[in-house]
Amino acid sequence: MAERPDIDLTRPSAARVYDYYLGGAHNFAVDREMARQAIGMWPELPLIMQANRAFLRRAVEFCVERGVRQFLDLGSGIPTVGNVHEVARKADPEACVVYVDNDPIAVTYSRTILGDDKQTLVVQEDLRHPERVVEDPAVRDLLDFDQPIAVMMVAVLHFVPDDDGPGDIVAAYRDAVPPGSFLVVSHATHEGQDTQADDHQDLYRQRTATPMTMRSKDQVRSLFAGYDLVEPGVVHLPLWRPASLDDVADDPMRFAGLAAVGRKA
Ligand SMILES: C[S@@+](CC[C@H](N)C(=O)[O-])C[C@H]1O[C@@H](n2cnc3c(N)ncnc32)[C@H](O)[C@@H]1O
């Protein structure tokens, strides 16, 4: 790769470590070393990440079944199997997706994969600046803010510390989209976990530029102000509308992520 001053190879990045957990190839030695350390502390981490991706796919299918054809995927990550546009287009080839991430590797690989696809856009931006995202002319060219939009914040809000006001950020996106829009969230939690979850949180704090803040069910529920939570509410990842009960592991609480979808009334 050509030298890129915006890519820090001395520190693991959340996007690249997640890519390693999912079996991807877009990570560096420093990311693999941290990921292996984390897996050593908590061997189920890759399974938890897979459960998160499976939730993302079910949530996109849920939104398209309810007529949504536009997606704003915030903290979209490095492309992997079952990206939002792929899932949405199975239902409707006209579906449009804006991918937003602040990680240069995630953005570069997303652009490489999507090429000149006219129904997708990749924006390098920090989701903590909602006005920059929703006022971006290229975003407005692709998404019609008078029609419902699914705002996806999947496995990303735990990288937004309390001091940055995650509730206000989510509310700003809510206010930018019309009634009938959806909010899709998954979020790391320590609820139902032993000390592994706290150790994992500490590792991100010590090693990455994006410290992790785990949140409780009540805290995640409060992010849905102005949305009606759809059934089954805020639940552990495998319990959110599984395709079949056979897909639910014996102990779903050990998947240390909460999942929920809300509809703006
Ligand atoms: C764990 S990955 C999740 C990727 C994808 N949403 C998924 O669930 O499979 C988190 C992503 O959020 C991105 N991210 C973290 N903080 C962000 C911020 N403030 N603005 C935009 N992206 C952010 C990271 O770069 C990373 O790609």
Image (spheres, rainbow, N blue to C red):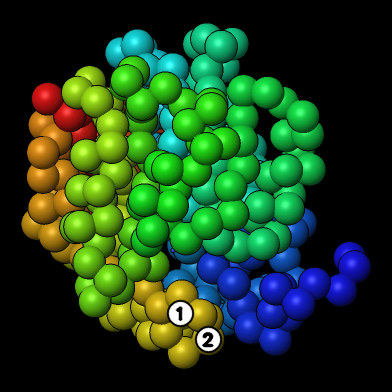
Residue 235 in view of the camera: no
Does the rendering let one see residue 179? yes
The local crowd at label 2, few if under 14, some if 14 to 19, many if 20 or more residues have their Cα within 10 Å, is some
Q: Are marks 2 and 1 in contact (CB under 8 Å)?
A: yes
Q: Amino acid at mark 1?
A: Tyr
Disc 2 on helix, strand or loop?
helix
Q: Is residue 216 above or below residue 94?
A: below
Categorize mark 1 by other alpha carbons within 10 Å: few (<14), some (14-19), many (20+). Answer: many
Res 229 → quadrant: top left
Element under disc 1? helix
Q: Which residue is mark 2?
A: 207
- The residue positioned 34% from the left and 18% from the top of the image is 147
**Left or right, 179 with reference to 110:** left
Instruction: Name the mark on residue 204.
Output: 1
Q: Measured from the top left, where is residue 64 in percent x and y? A: 40, 16
Q: From the viewer's perspective, tell me whether residue 241 is left or right of residue 144.
A: left
Q: CA distance from mark 2 to mark 1?
A: 5 Å
